[in-house]
Every structure is written in C-alpha cells, then in structure tokens.
Image (cartoon, helix red, strand yellow):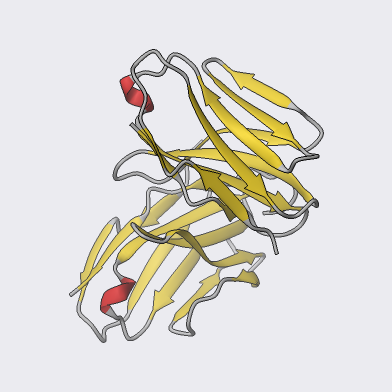
Amino acid sequence: KAGVTQTPRYLIKTRGQQVTLSCSPISGHRSVSWYQQTPGQGLQFLFEYFSETQRNKGNFPGRFSGRQFSNSRSEMNVSTLELGDSALYLCASSLNGQGVDEQYFGPGTRLTVT
Amino acid sequence: GENVEQHPSTLSVQEGDSAVIKCTYSDSASNYFPWYKQELGKGPQLIIDIRSNVGEKKDQRIAVTLNKTAKHFSLHITETQPEDSAVYFCAARPGFQKLVFGTGTRLL
C-alpha cells in the first residue's frame, strides 16, 4: 500500500511569487491535513479537507489556501510569498480524520523563499 | 480548545538506557493519543498510539502509558539505540476535532 506522496519535494521561490504544493493521500483516505513546520514553531496546523470541503482551519493568513479534489488529492497554495514562509510543508492523511483514526504523514515539501 | 504540553524539549541518554517523554493535555474529551518519530529530512512517522480506554500499550522496545485522571501520557523507550535518535512528537485528539501536537522532544 503506497504511503502519502507529496510533490515537489524541494522548491525555491522568490518573494512575491506564488506556489502550489500537491499531496496524494493513502488510497481510501478521505481526510487530508496540511501542516507548516519550522525549527522554532514545531508543527503548525494549516487546514484539513474532507470530501472536498475544508473542515478545520488553523490560524494562518488568507494567503494560504487549499482545495481537495474528488479523488481526495489535495493542493495548497501560498500567494505573495514572504521570507517567513520558508518551511517544510507536510501533508497527512487519514480515513476520516476523526476519533481514533490513524494519521499518516508524507515526506514533506521543503520550500525556500529568497 | 485542546492544548498539549511536551517535556523535555531535549533528552540525552546513553545507548542502552531508557528514555521517557511526557505529555499533558487539557481537554478531557480527548480519546486518541498518537506518538510520532521524525528523523532528519523526513516526515513524522506514526510509531505507536493509544486509545482512551487503554492504560498501556507496548510494541517491542516502545511503550505508551495513559493516565486519564491526571490527563497525561508518556512514551517509554527501553534499551535505546543510535537509530532512536530523532525528534518525537506527542498528539491528542478530542473526539471529532483535529489532532493537536506537542512541541517535540529531541532525543540524542
């Protein structure tokens, strides 16, 4: 059974640009969550999608957005990039994202903003 | 909402010794408590989890205990080996809400 995959693995962008990251969940998983990880801030929750609907949202500005497709694949977009957006962006999937559902992470996309 | 505190932030042990990482949570509705291990350059890997109706769970050298009354849970690693060096995260989920993570422990 394939795990969670994320593309691209590494990305270098310039301030002001926008970026789109992609996540393919484990087959059969319908919940996809996104996290930002920086050395000083740990795992910061961005948002969660379930059945193409955003179900939970973290405390991030509107420059961060996402969507989920009918096959449960998800994308997140960051517009008008800032230096502080440099981080490891992690995607995680679970069956339904509730109760005792196990959540599995992908390898992450390392974004560097210059 | 749920708040998870994790201690210590760094833990240094000798090979062969035991390591214990502790977490406390605030929401009594939390019923699921996973632990993740993150190695350098990789995403967090689920290593063990415990449900609120269980007090202890073991998997080889790893064990997790849960004290619902005190609202704390712990990860125990016995006979530590060099490959156990990583950052460990605890998490809690209150019912139908999202997972809330601790701040991580770097095990050396």
Q: Residue A18: x percent and y percent?
A: 31, 81
Residue at screen point 23% across, 82% down: A15
Q: How many marks?
A: 0
State which quadrant residue A85 falls in: bottom left
Residue A30 horizontal side relative to residue B42, left or right: right
Q: Residue B52: x percent and y percent?
A: 78, 38
Whether residue A28 is visible: no
Q: Where is B41 relative to B61, above or below? A: below
Q: Residue A71: x percent and y percent?
A: 57, 60
Residue A23 horizontal side relative to residue A29, left or right: left
State which quadrant residue B23 falls in: top right
Q: Where is A109 relative to B19, above or below? A: below
Q: Residue A77: x percent and y percent?
A: 41, 76
Q: Where is A1 relative to B81, above or below? A: below
Residue B81 horizontal side relative to residue A64, left or right: left
Q: Quadrant of the C terminus of chain A?
A: bottom left
Residue at screen point 31% across, 74% down: A84
In the image, B8 versus B88, the foreground residue is B8
In the image, A52 versus B99, the foreground residue is B99
In the image, A27 versus B19, the foreground residue is B19
Residue B50 horizontal side relative to residue A66, left or right: right
Residue at screen point 75% across, 27% down: B55
Whether residue B16 is visible: yes
Residue at screen point 34% across, 24% down: B83
